[in-house]
Every structure is written in structure tokens, then in C-alpha cells.
């Protein structure tokens, strides 16, 4: 893993990225809110243009708001259109489950075959 | 209004009983949010409806307790033993206020002030003055749950907020939370308009919602949720289902089902065709006219309505009504009369020997038997209500005596006649007190004898034929046969050298004036105790049995009849008079000839298959004149394991006996416990077997000494 590049920033979105041949692992932490949404959008866009295989780890996320939910949904949808693979790994934090439930984002079937929210629905059942 | 007050009192008593059991459970699991909620709701309802029906003192007092429990509910105060103790006393105080309808003595008032100040001390200082949202006026009764809700409606809401919603500082998630508060709610976010990552404006709201809400708070309450955004949002509220439509909208059978019913189509063929068919949703998606999320939202609406209707139907069918117990008693009386009339009818039909008449009589008999069983089952109540009271008893008493005792119960759902349950309460209290006081040892003694420090008392109830067996088992020190023997001979209950079996020795503890406890405590040990229990159980036509092993424990078994109103009896005749013996104690009937009597040399003993059975001549006992027939009958009964005969002229047969109590004038007649009316309108007396045997024994005893 010689070309591993680690990047750690702690301005608004706390995230760490691990890259290795076309795959990218993004670990998000802390609060995902409307004030950090623009930055998160940049991170996701970069990842989608650079890698085919992106995994999102949200284990350390403490709070999520509706704008970030929209953003995650949009990123997932974009990945499908670009024929790339964006998936969620690690355990699903309670904050994400709660907001997804409260905002009515949980569903059995989504707009795509493998909806980002469908597996959280399974977790919440 | 008085009616309402009574209804409230009754409801409040039920709530208090529930409160007690919740509190006791809470003591064991203090972090259980559901239990805390239950306690809070019970207090809240008592307060609210108390205020509504003019029980202002109750409302004001309950308010104080509720305030504390609201803080508990919000995690500001921890549940401690002190809190449950205090709340239990508060419960008792509410009960006192409830029973006295507002007028209470000054000592109770002092107690109340003390309770209120203890509750106030529990409130952390930073919370003083913080009112819970709906408590500002505890006496208004406005927030009480019995306030009539509006009709239940189900509505479909499409909520499309403006794109700049976030910029205005409004979080739609809170609005959705508010909707959930209104009732059963399903929320589906429509996310199809969320654009691609390149085009997304992170500060815009792209999501809109489809909401299905079933509420009884009224449409206005729903509209109020959207009050801040109604000008620039798209809000559509349609009522899609209300209570009135539940009945008339139920759709008729499906086409396939009708064809199958008519025999035009087999179930298998139908299933085959149906399986090949695609669901409408799938077809619509394939045709590209609907998006999957639209279909999902519609399916959720369909499912929601289905569930609401099902729960509505369920609550309709299981709903119960409250009936005053006097009306039930009246019903039982009438059914009793009907049973009597029916036996006359059957008798007459048999005499007439008219086949058509017989068929009718049999049909009536069948119906009345069913009616009787049904009526009896209405009066049945689970014994669990009594059991839960004992939890409190054990808790308080063991604390007082410094013992550690756990009460476990089993078979709380076992049903018994309401009257039996009511009358069983005192005897059971007595027996459990005995177990706590005499049975279970102090923790240090238990430890020394290798037992767990915590003693166990187990209460169980189980059906056994026409009886219910109630067992009280403790793992205490057990009965000591030597102590009993010593005590009994000291008190002159038995002769010093008389040989008694273990069972007979145990049964001595039920003798009047017997107590083995060396010291008299305020609980038991005064010698008035178990004989009172025995009397009460006898009066209920039950039996009591003790089984005990030293240092292992004691089991007391009560065998109680299911009902007191109607028993199976054996109808017998002496001269022109009829008597009934409870069939449950009858073992067999044998003949008694004049030769048999002569052979016994005047002693009242009969040989029954090699065994000697003493008998009582009822004719002599009741002083009935006239000649005895040449062949008399002995009805052999089994009482506490002994066989005793009752000599009568004739045995008529089984009889459904509706028990009527004798009036006050006849109450003290020994040997008769009640009466019943026979088919021909005559009265038959019901024999009190216990008393008869006892009196005969005493007489015998007096003769010998």
C-alpha cells in the first residue's frame, strides 16, 4: 500500500480518505449539517470523478440533517448514472437511522434497484 | 352526575390497582421507561378526570405526584426505593380520599401535607418553577384524557415545501415530528427531484412528502402544523377514510372468488392465472407512466388504511362494557329460577310421555344448560387481581420484620367466581401473613442453615375439575410435629398419648385457640388465626390441606369450588322432606337393612365391604317423625379423608341445585347451609356436611366422658 495517501482535515466536515487502485474509502465523522454540506459535496464529487469504487463509512457521524440526507441520496444517484459503485460500509450510526426515519427516507424499494436507504430500512426494522 | 362520579371512582380504583403493580415492577427495574410512562399516565388520568368530576382534592394531590413523575420521565430524577415507597403511600392516600369522597380526617390531612412536602423535596432546585407544559391549571381538567376526542379520520397529505425552506430557518423534520404526535402516521419522503451532485444546491430543499395520518384530533390540528409555511408551500390535505365510511365502503368479493364459489373455476386454476399476472404497480413502472417511489407511497397508503380498519374492527369486537355486579347477580338469580322451572318441565314431559313434548323439553334443557354455563362464565374473574395485592403485602410486611422475601405467582389467569374471589381475599391474606411471620426465617438464620437469604413464597392457582386449587408454598422452617403435639396436649385439644398421623397433627393447627408461635407479634400468633381461615374456607364449600417438611417448607392447598351459585347435588328424601348433599363429597350409596342395624347392637356403624363406617341418622338429627322404611339408604361421604354415612329413606338422584340462602331467622340452624327449589315447587334443604359431622362427633365425645 505504498501509494496510500492519507488526508486529514478538520475544518467543518471531518473526513479521512484512503485510496488504492481505483477504490476510495471515505470515512466521515462528526456533524453533517447544512453548513458543511457544500464541502461534503466537493469531497463526494472529487471521489466520484477519481474512483470507480467508493465506500462511505459513516460510523463516526454524530449528527445528520435533512440537507445532508439529500446530498447522500444525490451522490448515490449520481454514482449509478456514472456507472460507478458507491456503497455504505461499517455499522450505521444511530443518528443516521433516526433522521432517516424521522424524515421519511426509509423505504423498502427505492428509485433504483439498490437504494441507499433500503438497507438502512432493513436495519431499522 | 352521581353516576359519573361513581364511574370515576370505579375507574380510579382500577387505575390505582394498576399503578400499584406498575410501581412494584418499577422497583425491580427502575430504568424501564415504559413503566415510568405507565405510572405517569395513571396519575395524569386520575388527576384529569378527578378534576372533571369534582374531586378537587384528589386532583390537587395527584398533581404533585405527577409533577415528580414528569421529571422522572424526562430523566431529571432517578427512580429510587424512596421514590417508589413514597409513591406507594401516595397511592394509598388517594385511595383513602377516593373512598371517603372528599371528607377525610385531620390525621389523613397531615399525612397528605407530609407526602406533598416529601415529593417537593425530590424536585431538584433547578426544576422548581419549571412547569410541565400542560399542568398550569391542575383543576381545569382540560388536559384530561377522558375529554371526548373528535372522530377518527385518516387523511392523505402532500407537503411540498418551497426550495428556500432551509434558508428561512425552518426544519421540516420537526413538522413531521408534530404530525406523528397527532396519531398513527406514515411518512414517505419523495426524493425523485433530488438532482445530480453537480447540479445540487446544498441549501435547497428538494424533498417533498406524502403523509398518511390517522388522527382523532381533527383536521384543524393537522393544518396547524403547517401554519408557518402554508403561504409558500403546496399543502394538500384529503380525507380518505373516516369512521362512517368503514362500514359501507367494504368492497364486495373479488371476481375470482365469486367464480370459485360458484364452482365455475377451481382454486388452483385461479392461483395459476393470478401468479402469472403482474401486479399493477409493476406494470405501471414498466410502462413508464409511474415512478417506483410514487408506487411505493401509494402502496403505503393502502397498507395504512388496511391496518387502521383492522385495528378498528378488532377494537370493536373485543370491546367490553361495564355492568354493575347487582345486575349480574340478578341475572344469575333468574337463570337459577329458569333451571328450576326447566326441571319441572322435564319432569312433566317425562310423565306425559308425549314424544313431541319430550323433544321440546330436551331442547329447552340443552339451551338452559348452555345459558347457565354462559352466565356463570360472565361472573368469572381471573384471580390475578387478588395476587397482585399480595405483592404489596409481602413487600411491606417483610420490610417490617426485617426479612427478605420474594413472592412469585403462577396461574394468575385462572378464573373463579367473583364472589369466591372476594371472599377468598381475607383467608389468603391470613395464610400469607402466617408464611411471612412463622414460615420464613430471618436472613441470618436462613444463612446459618444453608438456605438463600431471600425466602420464597409461591402462590399458584390451577383448575382441577370443578374446583380451583390454590397453593401457597414457602421455603421456610416448616411445621414441627413435636411442637404441635406438645401445644395441642397442653391446650387439651388432644390427649397426651394419643397416636396421630402427621396429617392429623397438621390439621390441628386449624383447631380454635391453637397457636405455636412463642411470641405474639402484631401480625399473627394470637391464636385467632387459622381456625378463622378454616371457617371461611368451609363457608365457601372449600377444603384446606397442609403439607410440610421440617426446614424445607410448607405448602397449603386450598380447594375451592368454581362457583357458589349452582352446585351438583344429590337429592335424597326423609319422609316427605327433601334434602340435598353436595355431590362433590358423595362417594357411594349403600343399603341399610333392619338386620344390619340389629347386628350393630345399637351402635351407628355399618360394614361396607369389610370397612366400618360410622353413620348419622338424619331422621333423628332433624327430628322427623314417622316410620323408617324397611330398607334405608346410606349416602357415604368423604370428608377430610374420613368416610361418614348419612342415613336417609330414599335416594332420588342427581340434581342441579340453585343455591338460595336461608333468611336471617334460619341462619343459625346447624347442619343446613342453604335451600333450593325443586321442580315441583317444594323446598329442599342443602346439608352442611362439615357441621353435621362435627356436631355428631361432639355428641359422641360428650357421651363417652
Image (cartoon, rainbow, N blue to C red):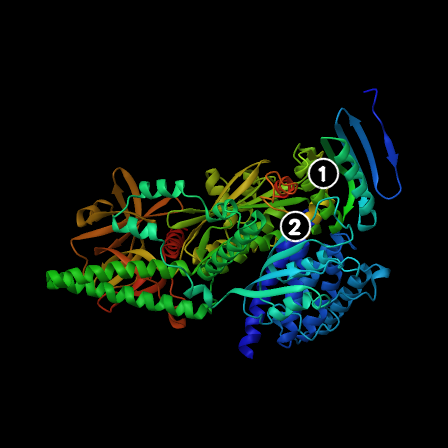
What is the quadrant of the N terminus of chain B in the image? bottom right
Where is B301 relative to A74, above or below? Answer: below
Residue position marked by numbered label 2 in the rendering: B191
Residue B679 coordinates in the image, percent (x, y): 23, 65
Residue B614: mark = none
Question: Left or right of B635: which side holds A100?
Answer: right
Callout 1: 10 Å neighbours few (<14), some, many (20+)? Answer: few
- Residue B166 placement: quadrant: bottom right
- Residue B274 placement: quadrant: top left
Question: Left or right of B349: which side holds A84?
Answer: right
Q: Measuring 38% from the left and 71% from the top, which residue is drawn there?
A: B663
Callout 2: chain: B
Residue position marked by numbered label 1 in the rendering: B444
Q: Give the SS element for disc 1.
A: helix
Callout 1: chain: B
Q: How many labels were placed on the picture?
A: 2
Q: Residues under labels 2 and 1: Cα distance?
A: 69 Å
- The mark closer to the camera, 2 or 1, is 2
Question: Left or right of A52: which side holds B145?
Answer: left
Is residue B687 in sight in this rendering? no
Q: Measuring 67% from the left and 42% from the top, which residue is drawn there?
A: A77
Foreground of the two, B500 or A120: A120
**Residue lying farthest bottom?**
B1
Residue B252 coordinates in the image, percent (x, y): 37, 58
Amino acid at each position: 500500500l505504498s501509494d496510500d495517501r492519507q488526508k486529514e482535515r478538520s475544518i467543518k466536515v471531518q473526513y479521512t480518505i484512503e485510496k488504492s487502485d481505483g477504490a476510495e474509502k471515505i470515512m466521515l465523522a462528526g456533524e453533517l449539517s447544512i453548513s458543511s454540506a457544500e464541502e461534503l459535496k466537493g469531497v463526494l464529487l472529487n471521489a466520484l470523478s477519481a474512483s470507480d469504487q467508493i465506500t462511505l463509512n459513516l460510523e463516526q457521524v454524530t449528527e445528520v440533517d435533512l440537507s445532508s440526507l439529500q446530498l447522500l441520496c444525490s451522490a448515490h444517484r449520481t454514482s449509478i448514472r456514472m456507472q460507478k459503485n458507491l456503497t455504505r460500509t461499517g455499522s450505521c450510526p444511530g443518528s443516521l437511522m433516526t433522521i432517516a426515519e424521522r424524515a421519511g427516507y426509509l423505504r423498502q424499494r427505492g428509485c433504483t434497484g439498490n437504494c441507499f436507504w433500503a438497507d438502512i430500512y432493513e436495519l431499522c426494522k | 352526575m352521581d353516576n359519573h362520579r361513581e364511574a370515576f371512582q370505579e375507574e380510579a380504583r382500577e387505575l390505582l390497582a394498576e399503578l400499584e403493580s406498575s410501581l412494584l415492577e418499577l422497583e425491580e427495574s427502575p430504568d424501564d421507561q415504559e413503566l415510568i410512562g405507565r405510572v405517569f399516565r395513571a396519575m395524569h388520568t386520575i388527576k384529569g378526570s378527578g378534576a372533571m368530576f369534582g374531586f378537587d382534592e384528589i386532583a390537587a394531590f395527584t398533581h404533585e405526584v405527577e409533577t415528580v413523575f414528569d421529571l422522572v420521565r424526562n430523566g431529571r430524577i432517578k427512580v429510587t426505593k424512596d421514590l417508589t415507597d413514597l409513591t406507594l403511600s401516595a397511592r394509598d392516600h388517594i385511595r383513602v380520599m377516593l373512598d371517603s369522597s372528599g371528607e377525610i380526617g385531620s390525621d389523613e390531612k397531615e399525612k397528605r401535607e407530609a407526602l406533598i412536602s416529601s415529593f417537593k423535596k425530590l424536585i431538584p432546585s433547578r426544576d422548581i418553577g419549571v412547569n410541565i407544559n400542560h399542568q398550569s391549571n391542575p383543576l381545569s381538567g382540560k388536559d384530561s384524557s377522558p375529554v371526548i376526542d373528535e372522530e377518527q379520520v385518516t387523511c392523505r397529505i402532500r407537503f411540498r415545501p418551497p426550495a428556500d425552506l432551509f434558508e428561512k430557518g425552518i426544519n421540516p423534520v420537526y413538522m413531521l415530528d408534530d404530525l406523528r404526535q397527532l396519531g398513527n402516521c406514515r411518512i414517505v419522503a419523495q426524493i425523485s427531484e433530488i438532482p445530480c451532485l453537480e447540479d445540487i444546491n446544498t441549501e435547497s430543499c428538494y424533498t417533498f412528502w406524502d403523509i398518511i395520518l390517522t388522527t382523532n384530533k381533527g383536521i384543524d390540528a393537522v393544518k396547524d402544523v403547517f401554519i408557518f409555511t402554508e403561504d409558500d408551500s403546496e399543502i394538500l390535505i384529503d380525507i380518505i377514510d373516516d369512521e362512517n365510511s368503514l362500514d359501507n365502503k367494504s368492497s364486495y368479493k373479488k371476481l375470482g372468488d365469486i367464480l370459485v364459489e360458484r364452482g365455475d373455476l377451481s382454486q388452483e386454476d385461479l392461483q395459476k392465472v393470478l401468479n402469472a399476472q403482474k401486479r399493477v404497480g409493476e406494470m405501471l413502472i414498466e410502462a413508464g407512466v409511474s415512478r417506483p417511489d410514487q408506487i411505493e407511497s401509494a402502496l403505503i397508503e393502502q397498507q395504512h388504511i388496511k391496518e387502521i380498519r383492522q385495528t378498528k374492527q378488532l377494537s370493536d369486537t373485543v370491546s367490553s362494557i361495564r355492568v354493575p355486579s347487582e345486575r349480574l347477580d340478578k341475572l344469575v338469580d333468574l337463570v337459577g329460577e329458569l333451571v328450576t322451572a326447566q326441571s319441572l318441565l322435564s319432569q312433566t314431559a317425562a310423565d306425559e310421555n308425549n314424544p313431541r313434548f319430550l323433544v321440546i323439553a330436551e331442547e329447552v334443557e340443552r339451551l338452559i344448560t348452555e345459558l347457565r354455563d354462559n352466565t356463570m362464565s360472565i361472573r368469572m374473574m381471573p384471580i390475578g387481581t387478588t395476587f397482585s395485592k399480595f405483592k404489596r403485602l409481602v413487600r411491606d410486611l417483610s420490610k417490617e420484620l426485617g426479612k427478605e422475601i420474594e413472592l412469585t405467582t403462577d396461574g394468575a389467569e385462572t378464573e373463579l367466581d367473583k364472589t369466591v374471589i372476594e371472599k377468598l381475599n381475607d383467608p389468603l391474606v391470613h395464610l400469607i401473613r402466617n408464611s411471612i411471620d412463622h414460615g420464613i426465617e430471618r436472613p441470618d438464620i436462613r444463612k446459618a442453615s444453608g438456605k438463600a437469604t431471600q425466602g420464597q413464597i409461591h402462590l399458584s392457582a390451577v383448575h382441577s375439575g370443578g374446583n380451583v386449587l390454590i397453593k401457597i408454598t414457602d421455603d421456610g422452617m416448616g411445621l414441627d410435629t413435636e411442637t404441635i403435639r406438645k401445644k395441642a396436649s397442653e391446650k387439651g385439644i388432644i390427649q397426651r398419648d394419643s397416636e396421630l398421623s402427621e396429617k392429623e397433627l397438621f390439621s390441628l393447627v386449624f383447631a380454635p385457640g391453637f397457636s405455636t408461635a412463642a411470641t405474639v407479634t402484631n401480625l399473627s400468633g394470637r391464636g385467632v388465626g387459622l381456625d378463622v381461615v378454616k371457617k371461611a374456607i368451609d363457608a365457601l364449600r372449600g377444603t384446606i390441606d397442609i403439607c410440610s417438611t421440617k426446614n424445607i417448607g410448607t405448602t397449603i392447598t386450598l380447594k375451592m369450588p368454581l362457583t357458589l351459585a349452582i352446585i351438583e347435588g344429590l337429592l335424597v328424601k326423609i319422609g316427605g322432606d327433601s334434602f340435598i348433599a353436595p355431590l362433590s363429597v358423595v362417594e357411594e350409596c349403600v343399603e341399610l337393612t333392619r338386620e344390619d342395624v340389629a347386628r350393630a347392637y345399637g351402635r351407628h356403624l355399618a360394614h361396607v365391604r369389610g370397612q366400618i363406617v360410622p353413620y348419622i341418622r338424619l331422621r333423628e338429627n332433624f327430628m322427623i317423625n314417622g316410620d323408617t322404611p324397611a330398607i334405608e339408604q346410606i349416602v357415604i361421604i368423604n370428608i377430610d379423608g374420613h368416610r361418614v354415612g348419612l342415613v336417609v329413606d330414599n335416594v332420588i338422584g342427581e340434581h342441579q341445585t340453585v343455591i338460595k340462602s336461608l333468611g336471617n331467622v334460619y341462619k343459625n340452624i346447624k347442619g343446613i347451609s342453604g335451600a333450593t327449589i325443586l321442580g315441583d315447587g317444594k323446598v329442599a334443604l342443602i346439608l352442611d356436611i362439615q357441621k353435621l359431622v362435627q356436631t355428631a362427633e361432639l355428641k359422641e365425645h360428650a357421651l363417652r366422658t
